[in-house]
Each structure stands twice: as C-alpha cells, then as structure tokens.
Amino acid sequence: MATLPPVGDPDYADLRGALAFDTAEVGLIDDGLFAFNPALNSLRPWYDAGDLLFVHAVATPYRNRSHFDGQAVLENGLADQHRTNSGWLGRALQARDNAPVAVAVDGGVPLVLTGADRVMNWSPGRTSVPSPDVVERLAALYEADARFASFADAMRTSVDSIRRLRATGTPQAASFVVAARFLTENGGPRVAVLSVDGWDTHTVQGTIKGRSQDALSKLANGLSTMRQTLGEERWTKTIILVASEFGRTARPNGSNGTDHGTGGAMMLCGGAVNGGRIVADWPGLSESALYDGRDLKPTLDMRAVLKGVALDHLRVSRESVENVVFPATSDVVPLADLVKI
C-alpha cells in the first residue's frame, strides 16, 4: 500500500487518511490505478525499460500476524511455520543437476537457503580467514570420503571468495554491494540472499517523509548500487526478488502508522525480468473487500511467483518444483511470462 499506492481506487483516500498520497506527489502508472512511490523514483527507468515488475495483493499462505511465524512461512515455502528443516530456495538449488553455490550476506545462513549443500555466508566482522595451506589440508581430509567431497570444494570456493572480497577493501560496504561482488566472482556464488530492515512502521510511517520512505529509499539505493556493481552484462541475466513476510494493514492505526497485515506488494527486478507492468487481481478497498476489516485482501499466493521464477529462471524441472520445492501445492499455478525469453 505504500510501495505501490493504489491512488486510483475510489476508497483509497478515505481509508488511508493521513497516510494517503496526493496524486500530485506521485507518478501514476497502470492507467492511474497505481502510483510510483517517490522514494522509488530512481527505479522508474527500470520499469519503463521493462526491468522491473510489481506484483500486488499478494501474500504467503500465512494468515496470522507474527513476524517470526510469517518469516518462517515465507522462507520455507510451505503452509506450516513449524517446518523449518529446509527452505524453498535451498530445495530448488539442490534439485538442479549442477547445484550452484549460494551466499547469505550479512549474517548466518537463513532458512530459505537451508537444504542446499553449497552455501556460504558473509558478515561484516573481521574474523580471520584460514591460510591457503590450512584450507587445503582440511579439504584433503574431507575429500578422502566421497560423502564429503562436495563440502571440500565448497570450502575452497567460500574462502577464496571471501579473501578476494576483502582484498578490494570493502568488507564494511553495504550488503547490496557485497552480494553483487560475490556474484561477479568467477566460479563464485550464483545466488545471493540478504535482508533489509526498517519496515515495521507502527509509528510515523508518513508519506513523502517518514519511516516508510526511509526504508524504501534505502532499498532503491541498494538496488541501484547492486546493478552498478554487477555490470550490465550480468544484469541482463539477473532477477532480484523483493518480498516480505506479510503486508501492512490497509487501515492506519492511531500512531500515524500501520500494523501487521496480510496482502501487500512484491517486486522483481533485473535484466532477465519481463517487466514494465503490474500483475494484480485488485480486490478493491471497500469495507466489504478488506480482509479482517483492515487488511488488503490477498488474491494471489506468493508461491505462484516463486514457482514461476524457479521454473523459468532457476531452470528447476516442473516435477521437482511441484513435488520437492513446493510440495502439496498443486492448487497454486505457477505464474508464466515472468522471465524474458
């Protein structure tokens, strides 16, 4: 509702009150139903060029309001927040014949990557890196057992990538830059996962100014820097998926903010995205259309988007997508045409 405000909905202004954008403050798109949040204006050329796609009124199958449970469902790709032994992206990577290396930036390995064998993580700390001699001695030990041979290769790749990254003098750089640098390493990770905070806008959310704008500006700047660091050749092969565990309430609270909601928006950007459009079965914002009387009603399961990306960009087989990556989801039809052919 803040990322892509539906300013053309007849009930928008009354529902949002002080959190409603004036149409004079935003750039209208999609025949005037939606508008580009001013904090994302630097990404407007991407949208116009077809490198940015919005999906609106979307949600995971989670319908309660806990950050922790909602995040678990977002990352495991299932309907049960208690199943935390693997994540949908980890399963997708592992289902490929030649699983690529993945990197988690700015923290430990998240649930979404759990289940993949070849995962490394980076944090901005200055933990010492083992010498090449130590790495080779450890790798030789693992290689002696066929069950652990792939771990030896992953260890070499991880340490080499971290050493080269530190040699650039950017260990304290923004997570977006670090992720992009890893992805430009020859033989390095092909998939990166990172998180951006600042979205829990219970107070002082604002419109042109406020906590929401600060978070969106941070996101836009990070994405722009990431593209610049990747370079245009790699950008043409890239998809960046931006999603959260749930949306915010459509109806504001009493503190000029919004609370944990249900439906929301997600973004796909990159040179491989078939963008320049908004995918939405818009439910409207009338009283009868709201979910629980206060939320944007979700009309699309987020896993339809994730399935489409897994099929057409990660090149995971349909059988694996339906039976391994997103089991028991035959009712969720993958979105087609998300990727440029």
Image (cartoon, rainbow, N blue to C red):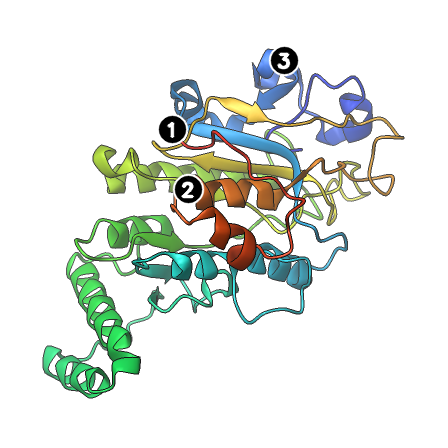
For the image, the number of numbered tags is 3
Disc 3 secondary structure class: helix
- Left or right, 27 with respect to 260, comes to left
Q: Are marks 1 and 2 in contact (CB under 8 Å)?
A: no
Locate residue 80, reporting x and y percent.
69, 63
Quadrant where the C terminus sits is top left
- Residue at (78%, 40%) from the top-left corner? 295
- Residue at (45%, 46%) from the top-left corner? 310
Q: Are marks 3 and 1 in contact (CB under 8 Å)?
A: no
Disc nearer the start of the sequence (3/2): 3
The amino acid pointed to by label 2 is Ile
Tell which of 127 and 328 is nearer to you: 328
Kindly indicate the quadrant of the structure image that contains residue 236. top left
Tell which of 110 and 146 is nearer to you: 146
Disc 1 secondary structure class: loop
The CA span between labels 1 and 2 is 14 Å
Disc nearer the start of the sequence (3/1): 3
Mark 3 burial class by Cα count in 10 Å: few <14, some 14-19, many 20+:
few
Residue lying furthest front in this view? Answer: 319
Disc 2 secondary structure class: strand
Locate residue 112, reporting x and y percent.
50, 60
Q: Which residue is mark 2?
A: 240
Disc nearer the start of the sequence (1/2): 2
The amino acid pointed to by label 1 is Lys
Numbered tag placed on residue 42 in the rendering: none
Quadrant where the N terminus sits is top right
Numbered tag placed on residue 32 in the rendering: 3
The amino acid pointed to by label 3 is Gly
Q: Which residue is mark 1?
A: 340
